[in-house]
Amino acid sequence: MDVLSDILKVVRLDGALFFNGEFSAPWCLSSRRSNDIAHYLSPKAGHLILYHFLTEGHAYVRLADGSREQLTAGDIVVFPHGDAHFLGNGWPEKPVDSFKTFAKNLTEGLRLARFGGGGELTRFVCGYMACEPRLSEIFLAGLPPILKVHIGKEPSGQWIENSIRFSVGDTDGSNGGSALVHAKLSEVLFVETLRRYISSLPADQIGWLAGARDPIIGHALALLHKEPARDWTIPTLAKSVGVSRTRLADRFRHFLGQSPMAYLAQWRLKLGAEILQSTDDSVAQVAEAVGYGSEASFNRAFKREFQCPPAQFRRQHKRT
């Protein structure tokens, strides 16, 4: 059972490829925190995840604290928490603000942008994923500030790279549906990166992503996310997974640091908050949809978690 797919459906990923660069060394781009540039790319985004995918040449990426990764063709580098960063190749390093310098290019789709000092060529595309912050924090919290994965060697990665190369070739958007294609490619690239990262985690890793990979906990998480409103108990969940109650509870706490029922309670409230923001369903309907037996019990739990009752939360956070 694919719990990652279930989660990603709920967080409503929305993305795009937005920049196609051919830069010659030396060059260096400075990118601000994603929250500071969201208005350029996706003004209504709750949380914006930027990434860069190298299709040719070399580059480096570094954070303000000095954390640094070397990149080669086939590497994708993702910034799950929206950190400001530098992307470049060669010396001297003279950063230019990416969104000021290339603001015009952002209105031209994926038309090739050239820049740099005339040395070694690096070709890359940039993309983003927008997602709901409360729901996505479940899997984002376990990711490092810089996430680098090489996807160029395996068939799925080669397919993605070839598809992106073909897609950016349609620079004028003359082929109908190009925006939709770019959005889907962005989503596929991000999901493939997460899949590769999860598969590369060491055997003793803990956290949500490691738990999702574990056969027992991954199965349990998939069931909870598939039917969050079901009247789950430790015995019914253990029986569905096919293990003892003790083994399930111990293993769940090992990976996630809490019991299955505590995890489910938190997830239900996050879902409830999302429904309040995105629909006109009554509070009673929301309570029922996320597994609460009464509106009153939902109100109490919601107020404990969000420091205000559901009706007030909706007034303050309703999406238009």
Image (cartoon, rainbow, N blue to C red):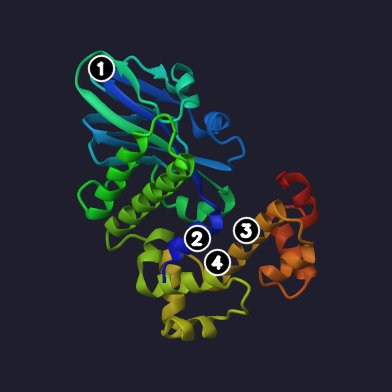
Q: Looking at numbered disc 1 in the image, what kind of residue is underneath it?
A: Pro
Q: Name the mark nearer the viewer: 3 or 1.
A: 1
**Label whose residue precedes the other's in the sequence (3 or 4):** 4
Mark 2 neighbour density, 10 Å: few (under 14) some (14–19) many (20 or more): some
Question: 228 or 171, which is in the foreground?
Answer: 171
Q: CA distance from mark 3 to mark 1?
A: 46 Å
Q: Position of residue 16 (x, y in %)?
A: 46, 40
Mark 2–mark 1 Cα distance, whole angstroms, equals 41 Å
Q: Are marks 3 and 1 in contact (CB under 8 Å)?
A: no
Of marks 1 and 4, which one's residue comes earlier in the chain?
A: 1
Percent across and percent down for residue 124 are 31, 32
Residue at 22%, 53% in the rendered image:
154
Q: Which mark is residue 26?
A: 1
Front position in the image: 157 or 244: 157
Q: Which residue is mark 3?
A: 270
Secondary structure state at the residue bearing disc 3: helix
Measure the alpha-carbon separation of dots 2 and 4: 14 Å
* Residue at numbered disc 2: 7
Please state if 290 lies on the left or on the right of 100 as rendered.
right
Disc 1 vs disc 4: Cβ atoms closer than 8 Å? no
Residue 16 lies, with reference to residue 40, above or below; the image says below
Q: Which mark is residue 263?
A: 4
Q: Residue at x 46, y 74 (%)?
A: 220
Would you call the spot at circle 3 few (<14 residues within 10 Å), some (14-19), or many (20 or more)? many
